[in-house]
């Protein structure tokens, strides 16, 4: 998957970050082809579990159903696929300014009862963020959009927003 996610923390917070795990999943042909998919970082900050997902969903004005399918697949499989466990110091060394995080213990995969976040589904984390190129569109012609923008009638555009519609029907991001 050609998607990147960077997460930065204050040096003073680093000793309180543990159980860092990365997951990646393609949603192209057979889950391996194309540039669509997602990556997820799962971690524990103090006693709070946090998940951050960055995704690139299907493009095109008529592809809302495919975007919903991509979302559902990623939300269900990301925490279960292609896991990599790291220490905060490994990740922090990529930062060129400041002091790298000191090495703190992190759970390794495979140990029963030792890996807190790996057993959590995405929405089982205490906090979850989903960001990225979701590709949801406005279901109206370009000229209609531009006329409303020029008139500063932004609320009239919201009723045509695909993501708002899909959330309202319970198809994605609910």
Image: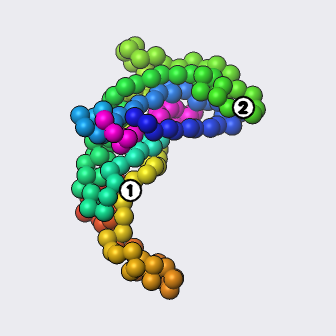
* Mark 2 in CB contact with mark 1 (< 8 angstroms): no
| Residue 108, above or below 15 | above
Which residue in the rendered view is the most extreme toward the top? 111
On the picture, is 65 further left or further right than 89?
left
Q: Residue 57's spot in the image, x, y percent?
A: 35, 49
The quadrant the C terminus occupies is bottom left
Q: Residue at x 47, y 27 (%)?
A: 21
Which residue in the rendered view is the most extreme toward the right? 98
The quadrant the N terminus occupies is top left
Q: Residue 69's spot in the image, x, y percent?
A: 25, 48
Name the secondary structure under disc 2.
Answer: loop
What's the magenta bit mostly, secondary-structure-wise? strand
Task: Let me know if residue 61 appears in the view.
Answer: yes
Q: Residue 51's spot in the image, x, y percent?
A: 46, 39
Question: Bounds of the magenta span?
Answer: 33-48
| Residue 70, above or below 174 | above
Residue placed most toward the observer, 31 or 104:
31
Q: Residue at x 33, y 29 (%)?
A: 80
Q: Which residue is mark 2?
A: 96
Q: CA distance from mark 2 to mark 1?
A: 32 Å
Task: Let me know if residue 76 appears in the view.
Answer: no
**Sequence-wise first label, 2 or 1:** 2
Q: Which residue is mark 1?
A: 135
Name the secondary structure under disc 1.
Answer: loop
């Amino acid at each position: 998957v050609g998607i990147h996610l960077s997460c930065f923390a204050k040096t003073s917070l680093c000793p309180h970050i543990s159980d860092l795990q990365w997951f990646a999943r393609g949603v192209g042909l057979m889950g391996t082809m194309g540039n669509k998919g997602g990556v997820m970082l799962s971690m524990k900050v103090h006693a709070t579990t946090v998940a951050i997902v960055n995704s690139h969903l299907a493009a095109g004005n008529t592809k809302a159903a495919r975007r919903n399918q991509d979302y559902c697949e990623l939300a269900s499989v990301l925490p279960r696929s292609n896991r990599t466990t790291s220490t905060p110091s490994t990740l922090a060394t990529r930062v060129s300014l400041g002091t790298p995080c000191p090495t703190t213990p992190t759970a390794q995969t495979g140990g029963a009862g030792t890996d807190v976040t790996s057993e959590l589904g995405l929405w089982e984390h205490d906090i979850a963020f989903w960001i990225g190129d979701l590709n949801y569109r406005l279901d109206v012609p370009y000229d209609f959009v531009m006329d409303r923008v020029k008139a500063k009638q932004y609320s009239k555009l919201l009723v045509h927003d695909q993501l708002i519609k899909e959330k309202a029907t319970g198809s994605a991001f609910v």
